[in-house]
Image (cartoon, grey):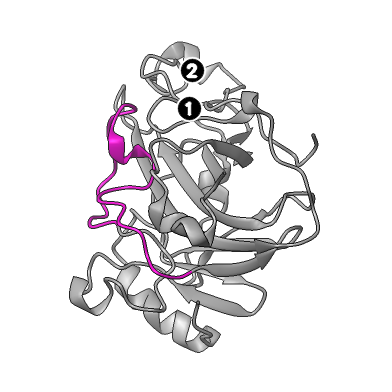
Amino acid sequence: MGILASLALATALASQWVYAHGGLANYTVGETWYRGYDPDQPAEDQDGKPWMIQRKWASIDPIFSATSPFLACNDPGTPPPSYIPVAAGDNITAVYWYWLHPVGPMTAWLAACPAEAEGGCAAADVNEVGWFKVWEAGLQEGTVTEGMWWQKSFQNWDGSPDLWPVTIPAALRPGLYMIRHEILSIHIEDKPQFYPECAHLNITGAGTAVPPASYLKKFPGAYDPEDPSIKINIYTDAMRNTYNYTIPGGPIWDGKL
């Protein structure tokens, strides 16, 4: 399972991320911090370690294609041995250090894994499971070109972490799940940058709800590469006068049947 770390320790880890902009460094549930994978540190110090709860991502570079097999959980997406315990209805917070890009939507997804006796999340095929969106944020105000995006508003420049809290649907049926955080940066003309990371969760609770099939998506497959929200030039005259943006991937499942 995860390791308990003090805020002081987590702050110390931030020094690794001062110049990085491509990944989710830590997770928190309540006061407990969980360490994610760090592509800047030796793989042998992380691969298969009992405290690891995040799928491996070997580079801060983005995924550039909406049809890449690594769109699900980054490259190579190797599963960790452990899980973050979290109760349905509680928050899990993704921790970034000095996220730099300002434009584009952010989404969070869950996918159910096989039972532990069947291999758990380590046995899950990230390209075949049914992902369902549980959180999203995009353009908050202003125009597509010059407005305020949530991706920009969650950034901190005082050395403190950039925090992204997501609530696990309270009615969700307990079990083993993967959580997928994705930042889609669209600041370069017609060249979207996808930054996905996945972690393993052991969700507890008394809920019985699961999302209808219409909410379930696959990665790749959830996005059309020609979607005007993905293949976009935000610097056109039209975008300078556009005050709305449709976040790709379909609707959020709120936990209701």
Q: The residue under label 2 is which amino acid type?
A: Met
47 or 18: which is nearer to us?
47
Query: Magenta residues?
Result: 57-82
**Which secondary structure dominates the residues rendered in magenta?**
loop
Locate residue 55: give its quadrant: bottom left
Q: Does residue 116 appear in this view?
A: yes
- Which residue is drawn at the image coordinates 46% and 44% (left, top)? 182
Determine whether the residue tagged by mark 2 lies in a helix, strand or loop. helix
Is residue 146 shown above or below 119?
Answer: above
Determine whether the residue tagged by mark 1 lies in a helix, strand or loop. loop
Sort mark 1 into few (<14), some (14-19) or many (20+) by Cα contacts within 10 Å.
many
Give the x, y percent position of residue 30.
Answer: 67, 74
Give the labeled residue for mark 1: 145
Give the x, y percent position of residue 224.
Answer: 41, 18
Judge from the rendering whether residue 72 lies leftward or rightward of residue 61; answer left or right: right
Give the labeled residue for mark 2: 239
Query: Which numbered circle lies on residue 234?
Result: none
Q: Does residue 42 appear in this view?
A: no
CB atoms at circles 1 and 2 under 8 Å apart?
yes
Q: The residue under label 1 is which amino acid type?
A: Thr
- Which residue is drawn at the image coordinates 43% and 38% (left, top)? 184
